[in-house]
Image (cartoon, rainbow, N blue to C red):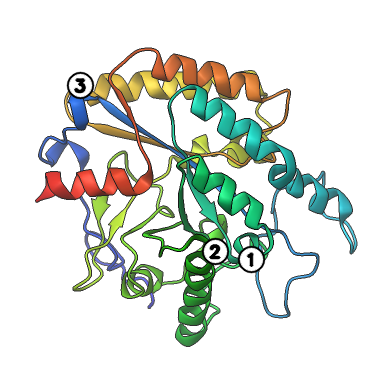
Amino acid sequence: MPAQRTFGMDHPHHEWSPVISRPTLHWPDGAAVTLCVVIPLEHMEWQAPPGSFQVARLAGGSAPREFPDYARLSHREYGHRVGIFRLLDVLEKHGIRATIAMDALTAEHYPYLVRHCLNRGCEIVGHGISVSRMITSNMSEAEEREYIGASLQALEKATGAAPTGWFGPEYGESDRTPQLLAEAGLTYVCDWANDEQPYPMTTGGNPFFALPLMYELDDVVSISHKLMPIFDYERMLGESFDVLKEDGANTGRLMAVNWHPWLVGQPFRIGSIDRALSHIMGQGGVWAATGSEIIDWYRQQAG
């Protein structure tokens, strides 16, 4: 659907809502901030199928090379082989259960990772087919519906339960994605980066919500794309939390971050993640939760 340049919102997916005009949001135990850590486990294919789309600046390696791009492929796979375990260890140290965004090819080809994440109490949410195949409006509605269905079926087969959340590869959506996700039985989506609280999306009769990630706190955006040194990134995480906690004294705020295990799971970066979490969790007034826990609580608050 084309954007409609009229007064107010120019798309139909949600209402405009300034945060200062909303009812007060209360998190459990009077927390000012809820922390959600999303970890993508995404497979990078050697060669994506014809017609598939991936972003031009897809991170990994130093720069795109001719096929086969071993540097990029193996850099990404480091997260599946090493980084995920180091990152989950640090989260567990601070009492945080991760929300794992897992694509279909990871679910199918890495059963050890599926079992490991489930055994550590992680929530697993949909993340498309692979990082090499991003949702765009170039897909027909039937193609996108099939894509979403294949992703969810792969996760249900691998985990034994249907996921309730979704995070598109590289935040990718078409102009109908929220409606199709709601139709598929999902409850929330993490692609929208426009708020510091969850909010309802307009998807017809199926209740559906946005769990907005903080895009500039995405490690790929800051470290890979903007070339931010890890110590600056550590400071940015701490300063972001401090402001959110101050604002959260009036109405609860959400700090949802997206961390890739092949990037912050590196041995020279994990210490900064550990120290940032020590700062965040050491001050009190924080509820660390999975995506579904946050949305379930928000739905109770919103009535």
The image's mark for residue 158 is 2
Do the residues under discs 1 and 2 have CB atoms within 8 angstroms? yes
Task: Nearest to the eye among marks 2 and 3: give it.
Answer: 2
Q: CA distance from mark 1 to mark 2?
A: 7 Å
Q: Residues within 10 Å of mark 2 (few under 14, many from 20)?
A: some
Does residue 129 appear anywhere in the picture?
A: yes
Q: Quadrant of the N terminus?
A: bottom left
The amino acid type, in three-letter code, at marker 1 is Glu
From the viewer's perspective, is 79 left or right of 258? right
Camera-side residue of 158 and 174: 158
Looking at the image, residue 44 lies above or below residue 147: above
Q: CA distance from mark 2 to mark 3?
A: 41 Å
Label 3 Cα neighbours within 10 Å, binned few <14 / some 14-19 / many ≥20: some
Q: Which residue matches tag 3?
A: 249
The percent position of residue 212, horizontal first and vertical second, equals: 37, 47
152 w.r.t. 301: above or below: below
Residue 192 lies, in percent from the top left, at 40, 53
Residue located beneath label 1 in the image: 108
Determine the image quadrant of residue 188.
Answer: bottom left
Q: Position of residue 83 (x, y in %)?
A: 68, 37
Which kind of residue does numbered mark 3 sit on? Ala
Q: Residue placed at 74% from the left, 44% from the top?
A: 81
Q: Examine the rendering and report whether any part of residue 264 can be seen.
A: no
Q: Is disc 3 placed on a helix, strand or loop?
A: loop
Say if mark 1 contacts mark 3, CB within 8 Å: no
Q: Is residue 237 left or right of residue 35?
A: right
